[in-house]
Image (spheres, helix red, strand yellow):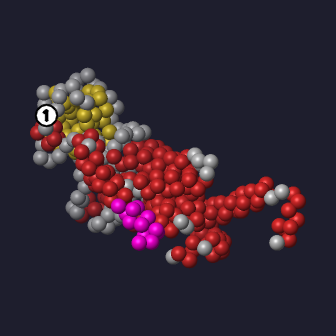
Amino acid sequence: MHSFANPTRFLRLTRALQPWAAGVALVCLAAGLYFSLFASPADYQQSETVRIMYVHVPAAWMAMFCYVAMAAGSASFLIWRHRVADLVAKATAPIGASFTFLALVTGSLWGKPMWGTWWVWDARLTSVLILFFLYLGYMALYNAFDDQARGARAASVLALVGVVNVPIIKFSVDWWNTLHQPASVVRLDGPSIHPSMLTPLLLMAVGYTAFYAWVLFLRVRTEFAAEKIRALRFRQAAVPPARELKSQEG
Amino acid sequence: MKRKHQRMSLLGLAALAIAGAAALILTAFEDNIVFFHSPTDLVTKEFSPTQRLRVGGLVEQGSVQKQGDGVTVRFVVTDTAESVPILFKGILPDLFREGQGIVAEGTFRNGVFQASEVLAKHDETYMPREVADAIKATGQWKGDE
């Protein structure tokens, strides 16, 4: 595992995997959208409104998955000082925030016709909103310091503190009375969702995950490139013109 | 102990402390975190008649009646142990029907719940209509209809 902390090796890996992730994401999302919007049955209670679920549920899963990935990267950065892990966490934050936003918006659009309200302060909705703010807080804190290393450390600590929210989101529907319904797929007695609807949902979930990997690889490589540029500029500014020739030779 | 092991145990301890703190806070605020109370809570616990609260449960079969003014609806919400009559004036959500889970917000006075808002609670079962009809036809239906 620690061998991937080597930036060169990690970059080589991302370069190799990126086209595969992109391919899987595009195929699964295209197929998933076709099945969920056109080739799947309407629900017996919700009728066509059920189709929002295929966009909403995987987005909510990814919101939590990305947060765990971000926290794992932060922990690895704080313990072993792995720069790669920090960049993975940093690159994950905006992706996870986008998934969370998508889950909140689609959930709201579903809630109005089904529940009769856009928003309620029940435990599930509130904890997901807190998750969204944790992502925003992480990104803000990361960039709040002149010294980037300090920002990275402070943001990593925040990411780890916030991880306590993830089990709260997952089990909020079991621990308390909520308006939000309990889990349909990840539950002890098997999915309570018909296979004809579960298939498109899982297709979408695979598509979302591959999309995350794709964008993550892209963002991590961009971060590395940006870092290299920063280092070059810094050296350029630091080295007086007279010695520039010499340093280029060396 | 190497420094990275020090950091690891520090993080582990901090995680335990935070998890413990979160657990204590959530237990302490239990009553504020629940989105609605059950009819049993409403009957057994003491609530002030002016306190706004929410009650959730299933709409009892055959209990929905339109009142004389044409806009007020009276129905009974039950958790199978206790039931509470609800008066509501307004538009009910599409999913509202007898047997359906609902959440009503309002005040509980003299044994009647005066609701200002009624929300439908959706359950976690998803299936096509034909499948639902087929299950009902075989008599295996475990849902609330």
> Is residue A244 toward the left or the right of residue B106 in the image?
right
Between B11 and A63, which is closer to the camera in this rendering?
Answer: B11
Looking at the rendered image, the quarter that the N terminus of chain B falls into is: bottom left
Measured as percent of width and height from the top left, residue B15 is found at 36, 59
Quarter assignment of residue B51: top left
Image point (82%, 72%), residue name: A250
Image point (45%, 72%), residue name: B2
Magenta stretch, residue numbers: B1-13
Judging from the image, mark 1 belongs to the subunit labelled B
Q: Which residue is mark 1?
A: B46
Measured as percent of width and height from the top left, residue B102 is found at 27, 42
Above-or-below relation of A117 to A208: above
Residue A72 is inside the magenta segment: no
Image point (72%, 60%), residue name: A231
Between B108 and B101, which is closer to the camera in this rendering?
Answer: B108
Tag 1: residue type? Glu
Q: Main secondary structure of the magenta part?
A: helix
> Is residue B62 toward the left or the right of residue A149 in the image?
left
Image point (48%, 66%), residue name: A79
Would you call the spot at circle 1 few (<14 residues within 10 Å), some (14-19), or many (20 or more)? few
- Element under label 1? loop
